[in-house]
Amino acid sequence: MENQVEEIKKKLDIVSVISKYLPLKKRGRHFLACCPFHSEKTPSFTVSPELQIFKCFGCGKAGDIYTFVQEFERVTFRDALEILAKDAGITLEKSEQLTAAEYRQKRLLALNEEVARFYHYILTSHPLGKKALDYVLGRGITLPTIKLFHLGYSPQNPQLLVNYLTKKKFTQSELILSGTFGKSTYRPGLYDRFIDRLTFPLSDQRGRVLGFSGRILPGSKPDLAKYVNSPETDLYHKGQVVFGLHLAKDSIRHQKSVIVTEGEFDLIS
């Protein structure tokens, strides 16, 4: 793995890497930009192609391509390594043992992907989702848009999803840790907190599903909250997730502007 860390650094130029995130301007032997890690009007963020490092002379942040991606994307070194390996076209060796926390994160991410896939299938391809699909299409949202945002529907029988995930070898404790499921004190089994709701996967900037938001459909009980989100979990922290950002971030950087909307439907529409 250490050899691959160096191999990736040799294949990727730091100016090219950082230019995907910031507009750099050449000045002499270096490239400059306003620092993304603190507020400033005069550029003090400096990138050296010769040394393959960056340094901000305002806040003191400094490092190589791994440090930059970690700080900018707010990810672990392993995550930064995966991002940069993909950019370099290198397949990482899977020789290192995962820590308990890393293994749990990997399992929960895989579980959330399966939940999103199940919800999406029910909405787009199963009779149980027809009511929800008719509602979404009736709002002028097309099938390609539904697929782009991976919208879904949670059926009224939560056991269907539990059975699906059990066949995928996920445990009951993992289902509860994901935040999608809870254990009822009134009846046996697990309940799905998004039952009979239209679902929106909430993803990080890499497109990994961290949690969900669920919206009631017309005709639902009047005492139900219009929207519910996943609770705080190992993966999902509400204040750190912006719906649709993983799809919009490249355009935002290119256009240098962004429109922020209140809800998921506002963005999709």
Image (cartoon, rainbow, N blue to C red):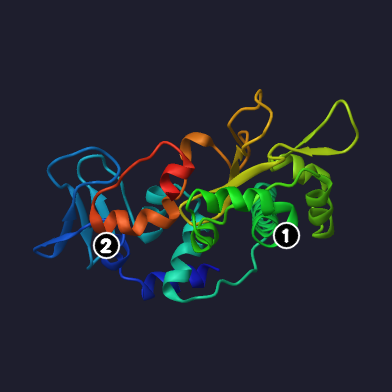
Give x and y (percent) for residue 160.
82, 51
In percent of the image, x 88 and y 26: which residue is there?
186
Residue carrying label 1: 126
Relative height, residue 110 to residue 37 (above, below): below
- Residue shown at the point (78%, 51%) measured from the top left: 161
Q: Residues within 10 Å of mark 2 (few under 14, many from 20)?
A: some
Q: Left or right: 37 with respect to 239?
A: left
Q: Residue furthest top?
A: 223
Going from N to C along the chain, the mark reached first, 1 or 2, is 2
Is 70 or 243 nearer to us in this picture? Answer: 243
CA distance separating discs 1 and 2:
44 Å
Q: Quadrant of residue 188?
A: top right
The residue that mark 2 highlights is 19
Percent position (x, y) of residue 26?
Answer: 13, 63
Relative to residue 220, is residue 257 drawn left or right? Answer: left
Q: Position of residue 165 (x, y in %)?
A: 79, 54
What kind of element bears circle 2? helix
Kind of residue at badge 1? His
